[in-house]
Amino acid sequence: MLILGQPWMTNVVLEARELTAGYVPDLPILRGVSVRAMRGKITLIIGPNGAGKSTLIKAIAGLVPISAGTVNFEGTDITGLRTDRLASHGIAYVPQNNNIFRSLTIRQNLDLALRRGSANGVAVLDHLFAQFPALAEKQKDKAGSLSGGQRQFLAIAMALAAEPRLILMDEPSAGLSPKATQEVLEHARVLATSGVSILLVEQNVNQAMRLSDHCYILAEGRNQIDGPSDDLRNDSVVGEIYLGGRRLRSS
Amino acid sequence: MIGVLSYLVFFATTASILAIAVLGLNLQWGNTGLFNGGVVAFFGAGAYGTLILGGPPQEGMVGGFALTYPMALLGGMAVAGVMAWIVGLLTLRLRHDYLAIATFGVAVAFENLMRNAEWLAGGAKGVRGFERPFREAIGDGFLYNLVFFVAVLLILIATYVFLERLVASPFGRLLRAIREDEEAAQSLGKSPSRVRLTAFVTGSVIMGLAGGLYGTFYAFVSPQDVLPTLTFQVWAMLIVGGAGNNRGAVFGAFLIWGAWTISGWALSRFAPVEAQLYTGSVQFILIGAVIVGMLVWRPQGLLPERLIVSQQGSNPVNKRGE
Ligand SMILES: Nc1ncnc2c1ncn2[C@@H]1O[C@H](COP(=O)(O)OP(=O)(O)OP(=O)(O)O)[C@@H](O)[C@H]1O
Ligand SMILES: [Mg+2]
């Protein structure tokens, strides 16, 4: 059903509809979750621990079986896609934990992430090293020797190495200092401006709200509320119920 | 003097052949984390394959194709590879323990098939009548064994170099990445099941090579050569030598084969006559004890894997890597 003027012909890149998904049969974690990611925008997903944010990302990435609902990427149905086919569709996934290979060097990590047979591998690497100078300096070091923030940058650089059109990022700021968090999020902003779409899960609600375009709040495996990030941020009801009101406004 | 020397050559040939099999297992277990509980089946496929393909025609048996030796040996390796490919295709997508059970089952089935299929493998009598390569030119006896040993040693070295290169290649890096984090590797577009299958088949082909050389050495193979004992010994060699380290694999093969030989000799020499019957069982218990002891006190083996994961960025000692 692809009619001219349908949202994804214009700016919806990814649309997940009514997803039911879970780790074991008959125990759904997601119960009818729907989200959309727009081209060149940062779409934020927030919610309490255990809300199902990571599960949503994993379901889209093909790591958690979907029992109902659909995932559509640029007009193609990718529901239940095999994870190793994601990259070839133009989607990159940055897992919440263990997103780099510690026993390999930084350069080897990036080589692994480059698309196979990509003619301009060297150019892509040069471009990445220009974006992440700290990684360029440490190319020959084991990735396990990087600091937490540097690891996140490496994970993001690895995602970018495949030149994706959409990046699924699961808490890229986990365990980072406020300053490093800011850097990571600002980098996401730069990427989005350059045309890459981003579906971002974050715990640092304040910072992420400011840098994102649209925001979904999930709780207990369901959509709660969504809207432009600026509106939600200033909405006192939303603030009270979901975001721990006072903290939000005071900062 | 020549007796001792001749025995040493004999010992070193067998140890080198086993070392090749241990290298194959190291690619599967040490580098890829695949538990092959049926090493002997792939070893046996190489041995039977080589002798059937390269041996003379015999009454009542298929085979006896009398291929030239290199073709026969490669054919034996191919038989091992095809077997591994089928087993791998069926089990590698499933949970890891299924591979262990499936390979164990394959080994039992293989032994039974060889024992019973007279038309294929001569049944309990085994495959005989194989003409060892260059025997006419070199003759039997010590000289032949010496030349054969040198050839086996060269093949061992070639296998070692091949595997060292493989581990350092992009494919080797991919193996490590998948072992470290399968989901992350998948999300970068890598297919763990395909990579594992490649490693499993390659390791099994190497075991087939060892089996082919073994069959050539004795010019004979029978169901007695494909008992589970061999799987057990090859595993002991890898665990003691150090899984993940190719040098450890070779070292473990010589060490355990030495211990096996010496214990066999000592038991036959010093054990009371009425216990002589049980020599084999006692050796088993000893090997089992060595495996358990290793796993308890030095699970990484005598020469552990060199996996350098430095924790602190500022620690230059750890930067040697690779
Ligand atoms: N591998 C798993 N197997 C079974 N259940 C899981 C698994 N991972 C998560 N869950 C369950 O799914 C639910 C949602 O988890 P999920 O990781 O999606 O939450 P989250 O919103 O990402 O939380 P956090 O903010 O802590 O990362 C939780 O109840 C959790 O117990
Ligand atoms: Mg999570």
Image: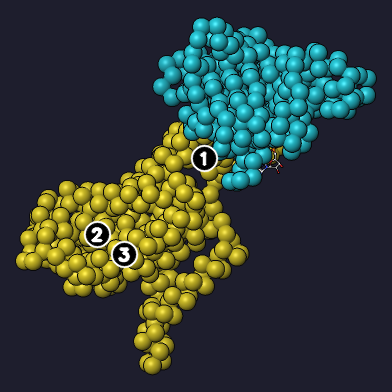
Chain colours: A cyan, B yellow
* Mark 3 crowdedness (10 Å alpha carbons): few <14, some 14-19, many ≥20: few
Residue at left offset 55%, top offset 65%: B294
**Are both tags, 2 and 1, on one chain?**
yes
Relative to A244, residue B105 above or below: below
Mark 2 or mark 1, which is nearer to you?
1
Q: Which residue is mark 3?
A: B109
Q: Which residue is mark 2?
A: B47
Instruction: For the C terminus of chain A, give its image quadrant.
Output: top right
Name which of mark 2 and mark 3 comes first in the sequence.
Answer: 2
Residue B178 numbered tag: 1
Name which of mark 3 and mark 1 comes first in the sequence.
Answer: 3
Does the closest atom of ligand 1 sit within 8 Å of the Cβ of label 1?
no
**Whole-percent x, y for residue A176 in the image:** 77, 29
Relative to B91, residue B311 above or below: above
Pointers 2 and 1 in contact (C-beta within 8 Å): no
Residue B271 placement, left or right of B49:
right
**Whole-percent x, y for residue A93 in the image:** 59, 27
- Subunit ID for the residue under disc 1: B
Residue B256 placement, left or right of A240:
left
Residue at left offset 21%, top offset 73%: B124
